[in-house]
Structure formats: structure tokens, C-alpha cells
Image (cartoon, grey):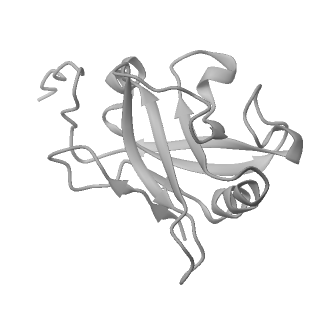
Amino acid sequence: MPIDAQVVIPGETQSRVALTDGALALLRMLWDKHGPLMFHQSGGCCDGSSPMCYPAGDFLTSDADVLLGTFDIAEEGAARQAVDFWMSAEQFEYWSHTHLTVDAVPGRGAGFSVEAPEGKRFLIRSRLMDMTAEAPGVRDMPDQT
């Protein structure tokens, strides 16, 4: 059963990103090896279309990024293990209408993403949301009605 990230965008009530059970298990294993983690989803092609997982703080975010949510991947009763999910603001302009689910599938991870040597990679699955976001630095989406 997927777990939803905590809602962090002001004015929103729905989570924008979730983890599958497979992604959660991989993240827990990676946390044990690398310590605190974070995701960044850029707007590029190739590796840029995959969510990249880094040790927390190794990828520097700025005003050009939007925090979509924070996961707590800790086992029940354990201390909090927060994993932030960031996206470039430019990419968020295009994906503001989508809910993202992070999955883990067999394959080699991308570039500097910490799962690269594990024989698995993170993958984004998306679906339309039933609301539109207003995030700092993001243009208003035109009304489609």
C-alpha cells in the first residue's frame, strides 16, 4: 500500500507524491547504508526524468526548486526518518497537475543516485490530480474549461 508524503505546499490539502512498498523498502535499506536521504526530480531528459536519491544535503536546493512533500520512512515506533522530495520549479510548471508515485524496479540507477549499485532504480509513475497547485515562482495554469 503506497504511503503519501506530508503535504507541504501552502494552501494544498492533498499529497503530491507517494512511495510504493518497493520504493519504501529500498529507501530504508539505503538509509541504513547512507544515512538521511532526499530526492530531486529535475526537468531534463534521460537521467533527468528519473528521481535522483542523494544523501540529504548533497544536492543543494534553491528558489529554483519546489518541495513537493516529506516522507517519514521510519518503521512504526522508531525515530522519524524524513526524506524530502524536491522538483525543479520549471518542471513543476509542467507537472503541477500530476500526482507522482515513486516506485523501485530492477535495473541500474541513474548517475549519482545512491541506489545505482543496488540493482534497482527509482521510477516515477504519474496520474492526474483533481486540483491545481499554487506554488511560489510557478505561473498560473490557464483554465482548461
What percent of the width, then of the height, locates residue 5? 42, 57
Along the viewing direction, whichever of 98 and 90 lies nearer the viewer: 90
- Asked if residue 18 is positioned above or below residue 92 in the image, the reply reads below
Q: Is residue 34 above or below residue 2?
A: above
Does residue 104 show up?
yes
In what quadrant of the picture does the C terminus appear?
top left
Horizontal side of 72 relative to 130 (left or right) equals right
Left/right of residue 43 with respect to residue 10 in the rendered view: right
Residue at 20% x, 49% y is 12
Q: Position of residue 111 (x, y in %)?
A: 77, 25
Is 28 or 48 nearer to us in this picture? 28
Give above or below for 62 relative to 96: above
- Locate residue 135, reporting x and y percent: 23, 31
Q: Looking at the image, which residue sits at the far bottom? A: 77
Of residues 23 and 129, the one nearer the viewer is 23
Q: Residue at x 25, y 43 (%)?
A: 9
Q: Quadrant of the N terminus?
A: bottom right
Residue lying at 55% horizontally and 44% vertically, measured from the top left: 125
Residue at image x 62%, y 15%? 45
Residue 58, image quadrant? top right
How many numbered discs, if any?
A: 0
Residue 119 visible (yes or no): no
- Where is residue 110 drawn, in percent x and y? 76, 29
